[in-house]
Amino acid sequence: MFSVLPIKCCRRMIEVQDVFNQHGATFLENHTLSPVQGKAFRAIESCRTAALGAHVNACDKCGFEKISYNSCRNRHCPKCQTLTKEQWVEKQNQYLLNTAYFHVVFTLPEALNTVMLQNQEEAYKLFFKAVSETLLELCADKKYLGATPGITAVLHTWGQNLMYHPHIHCIVTGGGLTKENTWQSSRKKFFLPVKVLSRKFRGQFLSFLKQAGLPFDSSLHRSEWVVYCKPPFKNASKVIDYLGRYTHRVAISNHRILALKDGKVTFSWRDYRHNKKKTMTITTYDMKGVSN
């Protein structure tokens, strides 16, 4: 005898493009996009559709042909980043050093969100400057390393819940070049204490804001800022692949979208503060979210 087993239906993945196609016109009637946002919106909406044209893939043995629509190649498109990331990773592997690497994340207090949003170009430059000078100055101190490390830094301006959350990811070599041009290895555990990093960064960034004439609440001098350092990578081969996730990460990937119904989008996100996976539902016209 044969038993019949139930087969789950393969549901087509909901994509960001579906949200744009179904509700984009209504959203644009009520919101004004910046030139960069508008360009990304149009690219994602048209990606791999007839609007961007097509090309023919043909087998040189059997003659079979398949028509494929062209990709938009916009860096914000969830369809286009995978291949770009793999190409970037392959190219960057040649620059790896045979040493440990650390992942350090610098986060700004929420109280600075307004000044960052209103002065993005200038404020982001100061953010990078404060991060790099913090790491370089502390590493130059012989108490910690006494050398110049290699640093790769990537800015993200959103969190998992898509709220504005500017932070910089850094991959830092576990060692550096001394003034005598010799290699100085760091301790196995991170050579810069998190509290020292945090307070040095706080002082640097607020000083830069003041010099630039950008406003901020003086109480930020007394608050603790969040700098996070992850343990070193087990081997150098993991470093670039890991960083590639950040250099080519889009705000939300298609696999995180769980439902699109009745003018609402539900997606998954991770609450890193409590290390829990959660869902959020937002309307397609005003982007106000409800988390659970």
Image (cartoon, grey):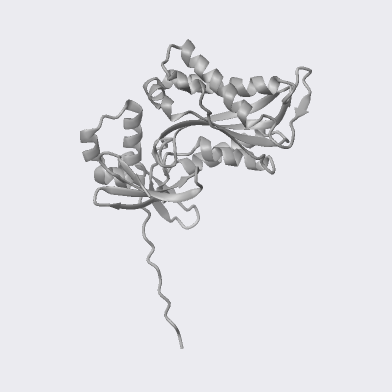
* 176 on left or right of 65: right
Q: Residue at x 42, y 45 (%)?
A: 253
- Compared with residue 238, is residue 216 higher up or lower down, i.e. above or below? above
Q: Classify residue 233 as left or right of residue 53.
A: right
Towards the viewer: 219 or 165: 219
Residue 46: image x %, image y %? 32, 41
Q: Position of residue 206 (x, y in %)?
A: 50, 18
> In which quadrant of the rendered view does residue 23 lie?
top left
The mark tally for this picture is 0
Query: In the figure, is residue 43 to the left or right of 22?
Result: right
Residue plotted at (41% across, 53% down): 65
From the viewer's side, name the closer residue of 224 and 73. Answer: 224
**Where is residue 123 drawn, in percent x and y?**
45, 20
Against 178, is 45 above or below?
below
Locate residue 174: give its quadrant: top right
Work out whether residue 38 or residue 47 is closer to the camera in this orientation and state it.
38
